[in-house]
Amino acid sequence: MTTLTRASILPLLLTGFVSVSAQTAVPAHHTAATTTAHKPAAAAPGACATDVPVLSPKIPALPAGSPCAKVLYTITTTPQAKLENVSPLEGTGLNDYLGLVPSSFSLLYIDTKVGTGPLALPHKWYTINYTGYLLNGTQFDTSIGKDPISINYGQRMVIPGWDTGFGGMHIGGKRRLIIPFQLAYGPNAHGPIPARSPLVFDVELISQSDTQPAPKTPPAAAKPAPATTPATPPAAAPAPTAKPATPPPTQSTTPDAKPATPQQ
C-alpha cells in the first residue's frame, strides 16, 4: 500500500484542499457573457437528488439495482460583499464574474456496495482504492492494478470532496462520489483536470487504522546465483604400462638328438 508520497493522483488530491470562500479567484479579464451561479433544487434528506449531472456513457455503469444518487450535504454561499459605484463601461454580469451572487452545490453519493465491516470513523487512516473520471468520461487516474492509497480522513490532506465524502460508509463498502468543482479544485486546473471540473470517483474503503499504515515492504532482492565453478574432470586413469611382449619360447636350432639306433 502506498503512502502520500505516491505520484499520480496524490499530488492533485493533496493540493486540492482550498476553502470554499477562496474559490472565487478572479481571472485577468471578464466579459458580460457570464453564467449565473446555479442553485440545485433541494432534496429531502434521504431522497434521490434532483440535480444530478449527466455522466458520459464512457464512465462504467453502476451494478444493477444500485440506488439513486443522494445528497451527502449541500453548501449555500451568500456573499457578504456588495458591489457599488459600477461604471457603465463595465457592462453587465460583474456580480456573477466576481462571485457576488448566492450559489449552492451538493456533494452526491451512490452506495454501490454496503460494507460489512465497522463504521468508518473520523480522524482515522483510511486505505482506499479509487478511480477518477471527468464528466466527459475521461479517466484521469486509478489505483486499480497498482496499490491503494492511505489518507488521514478529516485532516485536510485531500480535496474537500474526499475529506468529507466517506461519511456513513462501512469498511468493505464501495461508493460513487459526484463532486462539484467547488469541493474539488475550484476555478483552477490541476494536471489533467481542467478548471472548474466536477469529478466522479468510484471508491472502495478497504480498511481503517489509528496510525498511518506502513508502506508495503518491497520484495526482497533475489540473491545472485552462486558463480558456477567448472566441474573438475575426474583424474584420468594412468595409462597402463606397456609390458614388453613375451617372446615365444626360443626353438632350438639343434635337431633333437635321437638316441643312436643300434646298428643291426
Image (cartoon, rainbow, N blue to C red):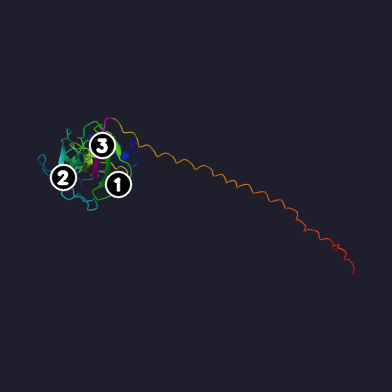
Return the disc, 1 or 2, that comes first in the chain's sequence. 2
Q: What range of the chain is rendered magenta? A: 199-210
The amino acid at mark 1 is: Phe
The amino acid at mark 3 is: Ser
Return the disc, 3 or 2, that comes first in the chain's sequence. 2
Circle 2 Cα neighbour tier, 10 Å, few/some/many (<14 / 14–19 / ≥20): many
State left or right for residue 140 relative to residue 167. Answer: right
Residue identified by numbered label 2: 69
User: Contact, CB < 8 Å: mark 1 with mark 2?
Assistant: no
Residue identified by numbered label 3: 207
Looking at this view, name the residue that lies furthest to the bottom.
264
What whole-number distance in Å separates the C-alpha atoms at marks 3 and 1? 24 Å
Residue identified by numbered label 1: 140
Return the disc, 3 or 1, that comes first in the chain's sequence. 1
User: Contact, CB < 8 Å: mark 3 with mark 1?
Assistant: no
Using the image as rendered, state which of residue 173 and residue 93 is in the foreground.
173
User: Residue 209: in sight, yes or no?
Assistant: yes
Circle 1 Cα neighbour tier, 10 Å, few/some/many (<14 / 14–19 / ≥20): some
